[in-house]
Image (cartoon, coloured by chain):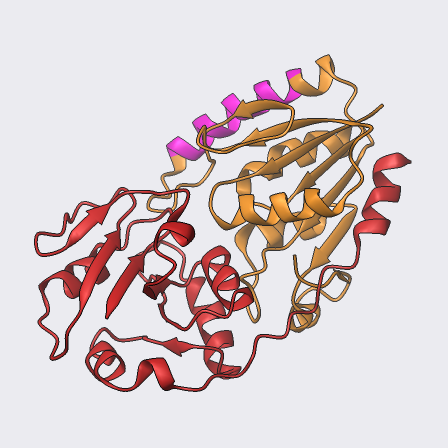
């Protein structure tokens, strides 16, 4: 299995280091997007940023930080993924959306790195999740009229 | 010609602003973008400012220096251009221009981040009291921000 691990704009060194240095009991290949992280993977390929990341790695299974931009993109495009709240940040706000994903059963949420062994070795690709039903933004007319006042 | 400021940061803040601008009729508008990173593609004139708070550090002295630098910059932007509105999706770099905007009697639209469901963001907590129009993208936030308007999700 080819797996893209992405951390968005904020480094998440402990996640990258854990996945880079852990031996899992199945056939896999990681590619890491690490932002400006200090830990540089030694066992797998890595890069800092790629604006075309979703196009370039569209065949990959995704492990992502719980940044809302990444999560909503993946949900809107029906990806299967594992998400991990980045608790290295000074604010812990990724837990909020992680709890939402978990409660609504939209994807797998790894709150402990020890969860990966079971998640990745199990039948993650055949696991069923609830569909993401989006309540679309509907205030554009109101904002247009404020702009034109 | 409608002239307004949009203020946003990198990552999810930029994604939300991009989605918002795509829904709006802005062909007749002149937009000045205040952002915290030169990596962002912006519409109109771009002004890059240092973020008031850093994701990894929260040093009081650095915050005060950034407040002073940004205040001076924003005031000049408002004086030079006849700005009638500020729109922001966060982060905290929007607080100062929003205060200046309100002092000058103009409107401020703030959209609380889509990543909050059960907690307030720092910026949302402040902007709830500064903005003239405060929107939330998740219904659960109406419990925390009773005067907010639910907008649906960008």
Quarter of the rendering occupied by the C terminus of chain A? top right
Q: Quadrant of residue B44?
A: top right
Chain painted in orange in the figure: B
The residue drawn where x is 58% and y is 45% is B90
Q: Count of labels shown? A: 0
- Above-or-below relation of A119 to A136: below
Q: Nearer the viewer, residue B41 or B56?
A: B41
Q: Which residues are magenta?
A: B61-76
Residue lying at 29% horizontally and 60% vertically, measured from the top left: A4
B116 or B66: nearer the viewer: B116
> For chain A, what colour was chosen?
red
Asked if the magenta segment contains residue A65, the reply would be no
Residue found at the very far right of the displayed protein: A149
Q: Looking at the image, which residue sits at the far top?
A: B80
Is B17 on the left or on the right of B65, as rendered?
Answer: right
| Dominant secondary structure, magenta | helix
Q: Position of residue A26 (x, y in %)?
A: 14, 78
Residue A33: x percent and y percent?
28, 51
B33 is higher (above) or lower (below) than B145: above
Image check: B102 left or right of B11? right
Location of residue B22 in the rendering, given as x and y in whole percent from the top left corner: 69, 44
Whether residue B62 is in magenta: the answer is yes
Quadrant of the image occupied by residue A19: bottom left
The residue depicted at 63 percent of the width and 55 percent of the height is: B112
Q: Is residue B60 above or below residue B80?
A: below
Where does residue A95 sit, x and y in percent of width and height? Answer: 42, 69
Seen at 54% across and 37% down, the residue is B93
Q: Nearer the viewer, residue A2 or A138?
A: A2
Please identify the quadrant where the N terminus of chain A is shown. bottom left
């Amino acid at each position: 299995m080819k797996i893209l691990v992405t951390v968005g704009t904020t480094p998440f060194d402990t996640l990258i280091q854990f996945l880079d240095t852990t031996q899992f009991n199945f056939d896999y290949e990681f590619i890491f997007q690490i932002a400006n992280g200090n830990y540089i993977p030694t066992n797998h390929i890595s890069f800092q940023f790629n604006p075309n990341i979703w196009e370039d790695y569209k065949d990959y299974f995704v492990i992502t930080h719980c940044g809302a931009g990444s999560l909503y993109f993946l949900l809107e495009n029906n990806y299967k993924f594992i998400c991990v709240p980045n608790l290295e940040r000074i604010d812990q706000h990724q837990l909020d959306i992680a709890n939402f994903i978990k409660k609504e059963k939209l994807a797998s949420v790894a709150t402990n790195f020890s969860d990966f062994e079971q998640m990745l070795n199990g039948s993650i690709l055949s696991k069923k999740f609830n569909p993401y039903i989006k309540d679309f933004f509907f205030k554009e007319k109101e904002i247009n009229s404020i702009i034109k006042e | 010609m409608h002239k307004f400021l949009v203020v946003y940061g990198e990552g999810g803040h930029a994604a939300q602003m991009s989605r918002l601008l795509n829904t709006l009729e802005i062909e007749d508008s002149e937009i000045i973008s205040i952002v915290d990173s030169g990596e962002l593609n912006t519409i109109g004139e771009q002004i890059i400012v240092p973020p008031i708070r850093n994701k990894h550090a929260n040093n009081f002295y650095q915050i005060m220096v950034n407040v002073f630098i940004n205040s001076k910059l924003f005031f000049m932007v408002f004086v030079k251009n006849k700005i009638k509105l500020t729109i922001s999706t966060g982060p905290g770099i929007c607080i100062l221009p929003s205060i200046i905007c309100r002092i000058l009697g103009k409107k401020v639209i703030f959209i609380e981040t889509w990543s909050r469901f059960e907690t307030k963001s720092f910026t949302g907590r402040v902007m709830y009291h500064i903005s003239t129009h405060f929107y939330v993208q998740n219904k659960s936030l109406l419990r925390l921000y009773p005067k907010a308007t639910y907008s649906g999700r960008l």
